Amino acid sequence: MPRRLAAASVLLLLSGVTSSANEFERVRPVTNDATRKECGECHMAFQPGLLPAGSWTRIMDGLDDHFGEKASLPPGPATEIRAYLTGNAAGRGDPALLRITEQRWWLREHRFRPEVWLRKDVLSKANCEACHRDAARGLYDDD
Amino acid sequence: MIRFLMPTLAVFAVGGAIAATANPARTALLDGYAAQAKAQSATFAGFSAERGRALYLGPHTGGKPETNACAACHTPNPTAQGRHQRTGRAIEPMAVSATPKRFTDPAEVEKRFDRDCPNVLGRACTAQEKGDFITYLAGQ
């Protein structure tokens, strides 16, 4: 708990802002096993509600080069995961943007100094759980 | 302390190796790769944990510079927890003694080789390399 508090304080200090209420601060957790397993192997299995359906479709179309990495899946799980992600996608957001971290709402909430992303325990903007301890449960309002 | 621990570790290692060879799914997987390796090379004479170790530790050229070995993400110690090089995601240890379910699901194993061999080597792995790799980690 002290660690969590400390992390939160650091973030507050660095960002200098508190977030406003945002529909993306609480999203439905991932309920599909294939999504949890396959996506969760290399990064947290991001909740479908974090991106609009158009973004998910393009992500699933491009798994051979998934942000520079080969992340292709066998047809069975790929079809299931695609249906789950697009069927539970966000109603808002820019479908032309593939990364959650490029969406306008995300950028508004993460105006930190660049050094934050280089911290060893953070490493990547995709590592939600470094700061949002309950991110895997869809809870991001702890900042 | 180390002297005291060594016998204990040795027992664990042997236990791991026995568990590894006793797993029918892993044996079947290795048999499959052995058949493929024979088909790919007339000189194939069985898998080698030593070659598997060299493959695991690298470093290799041909793949991505930041992932020039399996050990880049899985750490040089296969019983340790790894970390995805780009996302920071934790990876369960590769050693069978630490993660007994390793190399028991053929689809899962092929999926990972299919992705990671290009990342590390810049090409697909041969059947012999796959068998060497599993043989090495089954004994760890």
Image: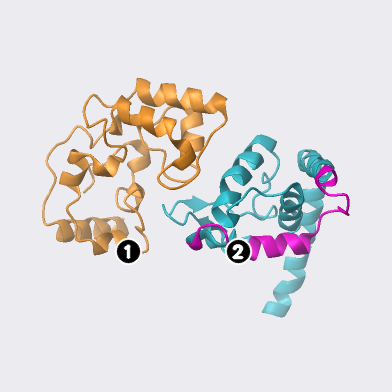
Chain colours: A orange, B cyan
**Residue neighbourhood size for the residue with mark 1, other residues' Cα within 10 Å, grouped as few (<14), some (14–19), many (≥20):** few
Disc 2, SS: loop
Asked if residue B136 can be seen in this view, the reply is yes
| Count of number-bearing discs | 2
Q: Residue at x 36, y 58 (%)?
A: A123
Q: Are marks 1 and 2 on the same chain?
A: no
Task: Calculate the distance from the C-alpha at mark 1 to the C-alpha at mark 2.
Answer: 27 Å
Q: Which mark is residue B107?
A: none
Three-letter code for the amino acid on which mark 2 is drawn: His
Mark 1 vs 2: CB contact within 8 A: no
Q: Residue at x 54, y 52 (%)?
A: B119
**Residue neighbourhood size for the residue with mark 2, other residues' Cα within 10 Å, grouped as few (<14), some (14–19), many (≥20):** some
Q: Residue at x 57, y 59 (%)?
A: B62
Task: State the image coordinates of residue A18 (x, y, percent, origin top left).
Answer: 12, 49
Q: Chain of mark 1?
A: A
Q: In the depicted view, which residue is nearer to us: B40 or B115?
A: B40
Task: State the image coordinates of residue A51 (x, y, percent, origin top left).
Answer: 29, 32
Report which residue position mark 1 lands on. A119
Task: State the image coordinates of residue B83 (x, y, percent, origin top left).
Answer: 49, 56
Three-letter code for the amino acid on which mark 1 is drawn: Arg
Left/right placement of residue A77 relative to residue A57 reads: right
Report which residue position mark 2 lands on. B60
Q: In the depicted view, which residue is nearer to us: A26 or A63?
A: A63
Give the residues in magenta.
B37-65
Residue A4, by quadrant, is bottom left
Residue A120, by quadrant, is bottom left
Q: In the depicted view, which residue is nearer to us: A117 or A137?
A: A117
Task: State the image coordinates of residue A75 (x, y, percent, origin top left).
Answer: 55, 26
Left/right placement of residue B87 relative to residue B60 reads: left
